[in-house]
Amino acid sequence: MARMHSRKKGKSGSTKPKEPKKPAWLGQNAKETELLIVKYAKEGKTAAQIGLAMRDEYGIPSVKLVTGKTISQILAGKKMQPEIPDDVLALIKKVVFVKKHLEANKQDMTAKRGLRLTESKVNRLVKHYKRSGRLPADWSYDPERIKLYVE
């Protein structure tokens, strides 16, 4: 598949197994895994950070194989999902950092282009999450108010 902004082809990557199964050596069950996810969510970690912690600290290669649900589905079931999705929040943080960089380096045209591309991606994701119901219909991305989400 082609890249969105660079007009280059993508690199081929590894493929997942056709029939994923829970590894036989894994000692965690579904309840213990869900409790660990809730513990990490209470510490303020995002779903991606929780997945990395599960992999690195507990050797769980895929939470979905163990529990039958993704980390986001588990957090939604426990009413612990953040108001703004993690990917949108990460892009908003990136926008804030690039704007701060541009205040000090006004002639950095590459950063200006990166800012435009990042804001465009935020707007596309917001539109997607509004359609899917993950964000309220009246929520809007306002470049003037974005610093409130990061702090």
Image: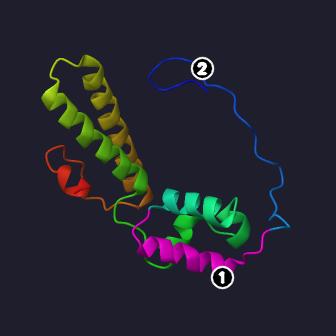
* Other residues around mark 1 within 10 Å, as few (<14) / some (14–19) / many (≥20): few
Relative to 41, say whether 118 is above or below: above
Q: Main secondary structure of the magenta part?
A: helix
The residue lying toward the viewer, choosing from 84 and 106, is 106
Q: Is residue 41 covered in magenta?
A: yes
The residue labelled by disc 2 is 9
Residue 52 image point, x, y percent: 57, 57
Residue 59: image x %, image y %? 69, 63
Horizontally, is 127 left or right of 66 in the view? left
The foreground one among 33 and 2 is 33
Considering only vertical position in the picture, is 47 above or below 146? below
121 magenta-colored: no
The three-letter code of the residue at mark 1 reads Lys
Q: Which residue is disc 1 drawn over?
A: 31
Amino acid at circle 2: Lys
Tell me which label, 2 or 1, sits earlier in the chain: 2
Magenta segment, which residues?
26-45
